[in-house]
Amino acid sequence: MAFGIAADAGAMGGKMETGLLRGTQREIACECWCTSTGKITPLMIKLKDEEGQIQTIRDITVHTQTKKRYAGIPSIEYDCTLVIRDRYIRAWLIFFQTEGRWVLNLR
């Protein structure tokens, strides 16, 4: 048995370890569409702004969707463009599958 990151990709279903999550993460609520084949598509997110007010973001463009593992936790990373107050912001939406938790990761 080896210790370390992604020492045995076969033991993890062929998925390589991505390592630690970098950048600024913010906890979010996410409304999603789930297809009959299990594909998850984010439709809307809600997050608290600096003043503590809940902001709703509905304008989400998903560019790519990638399955990853952060510290051994399976996740789906969505490379997105969000429109916030008429500004286009590139970010990642990350869904931690085992925890059922979403974060917004700003670049």
Image (cartoon, rainbow, N blue to C red):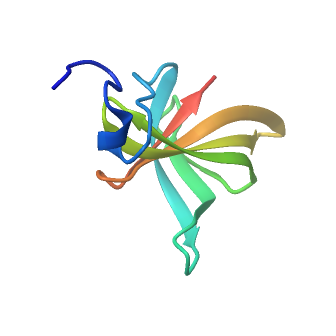
Q: Is 40 on the left-hand or right-hand side of 101?
A: right
The image quadrant of residue 93 is: top right
Q: Is 83 on the left-hand or right-hand side of 19?
A: right
In the image, residue 57 above or below residue 85: below
In the image, residue 79 above or below residue 45: above
Kindly identify the residue that appears in the image at 41 percent across and 23 percent down: 19
Q: In terms of depth relative to the viewer, which is nearer, 89 or 3?
A: 3
x and y percentages locating residue 69 in the rendered image: 41, 37
Q: In terms of depth relative to the viewer, which is nearer, 86 or 40?
A: 40
Numbered marks: total: 0
Q: Quadrant of the C terminus?
A: top right
Kindly identify the residue that appears in the image at 44 percent across and 40 percent down: 15
x and y percentages locating residue 50 in the rendered image: 52, 28
In the image, residue 24 above or below residue 103: above
x and y percentages locating residue 21 in the rendered image: 44, 24
Kindly identify the residue that appears in the image at 75 percent across and 33 percent down: 89
Q: Is 77 on the left-hand or right-hand side of 96?
A: right
Q: Quadrant of the N terminus?
A: top left
